Amino acid sequence: MKLHYQLLPAQTAQPASLPLLLIHGLFGNLDNLGQLARELNQQHAVIKVDLRNHGRSPHSNAMNYPLMAEDLLQLLDELQIEQTIVIGHSMGGKAAMALTALAPARIARLVVIDIAPVSYSLRQHDHIFAALQSVVEAGITQRSAAAEQLRTTLTEEGVIQFLLKSFHQGNWRFNLPALMAEYHHIIGWQELPPWPHPVLFIRGAHSNYLQDSYREQIVRQFPQARAYEVAAAGHWVHAEKPETVLRAIERFISEKSTNEDHNT
């Protein structure tokens, strides 16, 4: 699947700097990590991408991590990128982790924001699906009316405004039927072979997506994993505490590692 993307050339010429691939989460689009992109773009080329069934990328009935990883690898091939640093939030973090199994030598470092390589048993988005579907069933075409309809079910204004970013001319830009049908794949996971290169897991202290109980599963798949917790932040930690997250990412990607050169 040919994904929609935006390529931002580095603002400052840094020949040795690897490009960064930024991947959004469920219900999102390539603008969701925009604040990170703008800062990291000072020294790195940045690729922002819409995953399948999101944003301006094509729709499909199939939605699972092996397919998302194949889409991302096709994009790297299209852009002739031999090696990159990948940053993914939530579902995008899982897609990024799946890419390490498909093309382990193409990723130098990985940043996973508030998600773990595990299957989640709790369906945390069913109330959101219901709210989104209610907008469709009501035949709403105006953004203001869509907001009012969402508020009848959802109480978090930040979540409502996040969802409305994908409401365009009376339609959701994400493929709502496919996301609902394939949700078990989105919260699910198939364990990966070990990827022995640097990984930074960033979690919000108030989020339950990246728990200490997942440590064994994380280390088994990512032996060089380390964790960074951001205080007073939830699942959208990069939006709530962008400067803290940026500092953690910049420190991590600027480090040197003897195991980082996959060509030796």
Image (cartoon, rainbow, N blue to C red):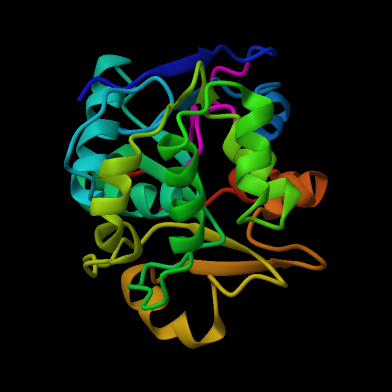
Task: State the extent of the magenta-drawn residues as a range.
Answer: 14-33
59 in magenta: no
Decide: is 78 above or below 125.
above
At horizontal 64% and vertical 12% (from top left) the residue drawn is 13
Q: Position of residue 151 (x, y in %)?
A: 68, 49
Q: Is residue 104 left or right of residue 154?
A: left
Quadrant location, the C terminus = top left
- Residue 133 visible to an observer of this rendering: yes
Q: Position of residue 116 (x, y in %)?
A: 44, 68
At horizontal 24% and vertical 32% (from top left) the residue drawn is 71
Q: Nearer the viewer, residue 166 or 37?
A: 166
27 in magenta: yes
Q: Position of residue 68 (x, y in %)?
A: 26, 41
Q: Nearer the viewer, residue 230 or 158?
A: 158
User: Which SS type dominates the magenta stretch?
Assistant: loop
At horizontal 59% and vertical 44% (from top left) the residue drawn is 253
Q: Is residue 131 left or right of residue 44?
A: left
